[in-house]
Image (spheres, rainbow, N blue to C red):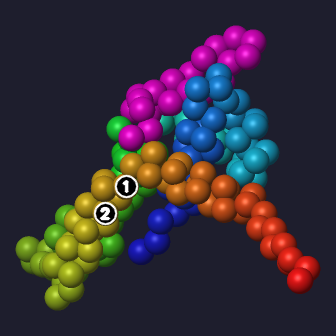
């Protein structure tokens, strides 16, 4: 089980948008260029994010997207679920018929509970991380990269 590009790109684009919050609408073409994500793919993702009120669109000249909610009120789980990213490690997609419908009762596999618990933990973790947490992390990383340390040697 892996998070697909849909979820990763959605989170990346949302961090990019949130980093520019308060500076006016951000165009998808600008995000596309900075993050090297296809513009048409971003359009699909942002349509879904807009329907979940995670982003708000601004039409007309100078238009683009703003956050639909405060970054601290958006969790990573919100973003991933909004773009229809499946967060499921079970073989059966949570239907509890791991051995298929052909077998009587469509019984669960022996590891169903393991994968089902992993699903719960994944959602729990992603729900505990806000978009603001990732923005703060990115800003700290950017600040650390721009710090220049100068060492002076004193002549005796």
User: Which image quarter holds the C terminus?
Assistant: bottom right
Label number found at residue 96: none
Circle 1 sits on which residue? 129
Q: Residue at 39% x, 49% y: name it.
A: 130
Residue 44 visible: no
Q: Residue furthest right?
A: 155
CA–CA distance in space, label 2 to label 1:
7 Å
Residue 75 is one of the magenta-drawn residues: no
* Residue situated in front as seen by the camera: 112 or 98: 112
Residue 53 at what x, y percent from top left?
41, 28
Residue 117 at what x, y percent from top left?
20, 73
Q: Residue at 64% x, 14% y: name it.
A: 59
Above or below: residue 68 compared with residue 112:
above
* Residue situated in front as seen by the camera: 45 or 144: 144
Residue 55 visible: yes
- Left or right position of 109 against 69: left
User: In which quadrant of the rendered view does residue 23 lie?
Assistant: top right
**Element assignment for label 2:** helix
Residue 145 at what x, y percent from top left?
72, 62
Q: Residue at 86% x, 77% y: name it.
A: 154
Residue 66 is one of the magenta-drawn residues: yes
């Amino acid at each position: 089980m892996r998070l697909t590009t849909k979820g990763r790109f959605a989170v990346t684009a949302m961090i990019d948008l949130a980093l520019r919050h308060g500076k006016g609408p951000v165009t998808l073409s600008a995000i596309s260029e900075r993050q090297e994500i296809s513009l048409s793919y971003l359009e699909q993702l942002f349509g879904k994010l807009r329907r979940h009120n995670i982003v708000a669109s601004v039409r007309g000249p100078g238009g683009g997207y703003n956050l639909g909610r405060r970054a601290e009120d958006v969790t990573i789980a919100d973003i991933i679920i909004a773009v229809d990213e499946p967060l499921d490690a079970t073989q059966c997609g949570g239907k509890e018929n791991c051995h298929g419908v052909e077998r009587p009762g469509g019984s669960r596999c022996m590891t169903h509970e393991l994968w089902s618990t992993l699903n719960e933990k994944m959602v729990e973790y992603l729900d505990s991380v806000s978009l603001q947490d990732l923005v703060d992390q990115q800003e700290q990383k950017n600040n650390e990269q721009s710090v220049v340390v100068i060492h002076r040697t004193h002549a005796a």
